[in-house]
Amino acid sequence: MTKTGGKTNIGEEEIREQIAVLASPLIDRRHEAISALREMGKPAIAPLIAALAAAEDNDRRWYAAIALAKIGESAVAPLIAAMREHDSREFRRYAAAALGEIGIPAIESLIMAMASDDRELRGFLSQALCRIGMPAVEPLRKRLNDADEILKSCATLTLWQMGETGIPVIVENATKEKDT
């Protein structure tokens, strides 16, 4: 990183170097690279998504996903956009894991992205919401009577997949509908 006029500039080369370290056989080096990429923030998102898409094995996918999760909220929209572009199951699985780890800041974007014709994508978005767990329940509850049938169905199925966390919400909603 170089400082110019009080601002820190992160070079593409430095980002590429840290991403390459994610494949190191030394776990401490991988963890250091994750920390460095987290500190680099937004400029590291696109290269990390590209690395996730090009990863040759699950270890590399895992560490790229962790780095994206550590960057946090600013990675949500680019990750969801990349999930729409890449139909690789492995890519989507790890991108969903990263979104699930980002947690609360990703909930609304994940729910809105479910309004897609891509069933497989919706499944991975649902997995991310299940990973988030309890914080996603109330936003999903609000979609149980959504005018958009896809969102309504996705909210119901996601709550169902959450098991003991989500099923009571579905039952409560069905009981209210029956009583009205």
Image (cartoon, rainbow, N blue to C red):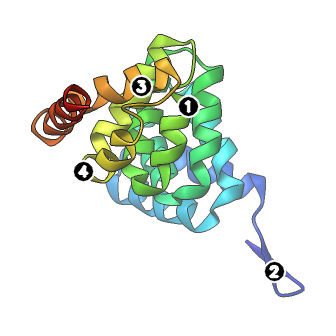
Q: CA distance from mark 3 to mark 2?
A: 46 Å
Q: Is residue 105 left or right of residue 170?
A: right
Disc 4 packing (10 Å; few <14; some 14–19; many ≥20): some
Q: Position of residue 166 (x, y in %)?
A: 19, 38
- Residue at 34% x, 47% y is 136
Inter-mark Cα distance, 4 to 2: 39 Å
Left or right for 23, reference 127: right
Q: Name above or below for residue 3 compared with residue 157.
A: below
Q: Residue furthest left?
A: 164
How far is the residue under mark 3 from the one under mark 4? 18 Å
Residue type for callout 3: Lys
Query: Are there few (<14), some (14-19), or many (20+) residues within 10 Å of tag 3?
Result: many
Q: Which of the labelled discs sits on residue 7, or is there none?
A: 2
- The residue at which mark 4 appears reads as 134
| Label 3 residue SS | helix
Residue drawn 90% across and 86% down?
5
Q: CA distance from mark 4 to mark 1?
A: 19 Å
